[in-house]
Amino acid sequence: MNWTIEQASLHFSELLKAAQTEPQTVFHQHQLVVAVINAPTFEHWRKQANQPSLASAFEELRQICREENYELELPPRQDRPNAFLGVTDE
């Protein structure tokens, strides 16, 4: 349910009860101010937020490669036929 700040303050206990089943949003002049969620949802979100991101994992890998003086050897590039070239001519 959507609440205004005034409604939320007047019916705070109802807002908390409703948040047990689904997130409750509070607006001020048609702008979202806050969302009230239940504790299990918050705990789940907090655990996920503490996990490292893919970007930080790659940065850690880059750092290890720098420390070990590792360089990735790439095979030489090979040209191959482009299947789309014939389609554009037809």
Image (tube, rainbow, N blue to C red):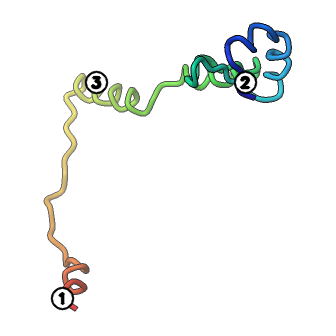
Is 39 placed above or below 65 here? above
Toward which corner of the image does residue 4 lie, by quadrant?
top right
- Secondary element at image label 3: helix
Q: Are marks 3 and 2 in contact (CB under 8 Å)?
A: no
Name the disc covering residue 31, or none: none
Point out the tag, 3 or 1, that comes first from the N-terminus.
3
- Secondary element at image label 2: strand
The N terminus, quarter of image: top right
Within 10 Å of disc 2 (Cα), the crowding (few <14, some 14-19, many 20+) is many
Eye-nearest disc, 3 or 1: 1
In depth, the one of 1 and 85 nearer the eye is 1
Is 13 placed above or below 80 here? above
The C terminus, quarter of image: bottom left
Point out the tag, 2 or 1, that comes first from the N-terminus.
2
Within 10 Å of disc 1 (Cα), the crowding (few <14, some 14-19, many 20+) is few
Toward which corner of the image does residue 70 lie, by quadrant?
top left
Residue at 83% across / 23% down in the picture? 18
- Secondary element at image label 1: helix
Q: Amino acid at mark 3?
A: Gln
Eye-nearest disc, 3 or 2: 2
In depth, the one of 81 and 76 nearer the eye is 81
Name the disc covering residue 63, or none: 3
Marks 2 and 1 sit apart, C-alpha to C-alpha, by 57 Å
Query: Could you say where residue 2 lies in the image, as x and y percent from the top left?
Result: 71, 27
Q: Amino acid at mark 1?
A: Asp
Q: Which residue is mark 2?
A: 24
Q: Amino acid at mark 2?
A: Gln
Marks 3 and 2 sit apart, C-alpha to C-alpha, by 43 Å
Q: Which residue is mark 1?
A: 89
Query: Could you say where residue 64 lies in the image, as x and y percent from the top left?
Result: 30, 25
